[in-house]
Amino acid sequence: MAGELVPLVLIPRFTTYAGKGTFTTVALDVSAFGLVHLATWAGPLLGDTTSGAALTAAVLQHSEDGDDWQVFAPMLSTPNSHMLSSAPLMRRYLRAKLQFVADANDVVALTCWSTGYLERRER
């Protein structure tokens, strides 16, 4: 029997990330939950992809202590796409990480969102 589903907004609709670098969400304590169910969407990547603009990472990360983060699951494979995923939660904290490389003119941006549910552990 499935546990109670609790709504999750990891990245609110419609969030735009602009500029090169790494962006992470706030770490969420998910120790009371056994599964995460996510729907993630991203629009087209802005910037000249022929001169280097790229989304190099769109992943979920998890951590036991909030300091040492490991890649947990992919959120997206490419810009201008969506992905549905479900995965068991095995660590205390969960966050999203997006990483961008800018083009020759130092331009890169992406609009996206990621929402879903956390499923409570059975007691």
Image (tube, rainbow, N blue to C red):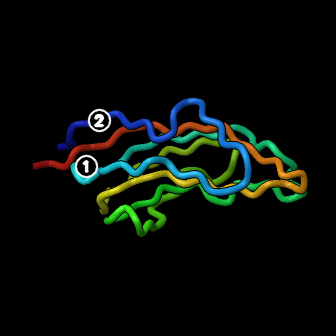
Q: CA distance from mark 2 to mark 1?
A: 9 Å
Q: Secondary structure at mark 2?
A: strand
Q: First in sequence: mark 2 or mark 1?
A: 2
Q: Residue at x 29, y 35 (%)?
A: 6
- Horizontal placement of 82 versus 63: left or right? right
Give the number of the disc on residue 6: 2
Q: Residue furthest left?
A: 123
- Residue 34 spot, x, y in % from top left: 26, 52
Query: Is 114 situated above or below 69?
Result: above
Q: Residue at x 44, y 47 (%)?
A: 26
Q: Quadrant of residue 109?
A: top right
Give 36 or 29, whichever is nearer the viewer.
29
- Given the image, on which type of amino acid does mark 1 rest? Phe
Q: Is residue 74 left or right of residue 52?
A: left
Q: Are marks 2 and 1 in contact (CB under 8 Å)?
A: yes
Disc number placed over residue 33 in the picture, else none: 1
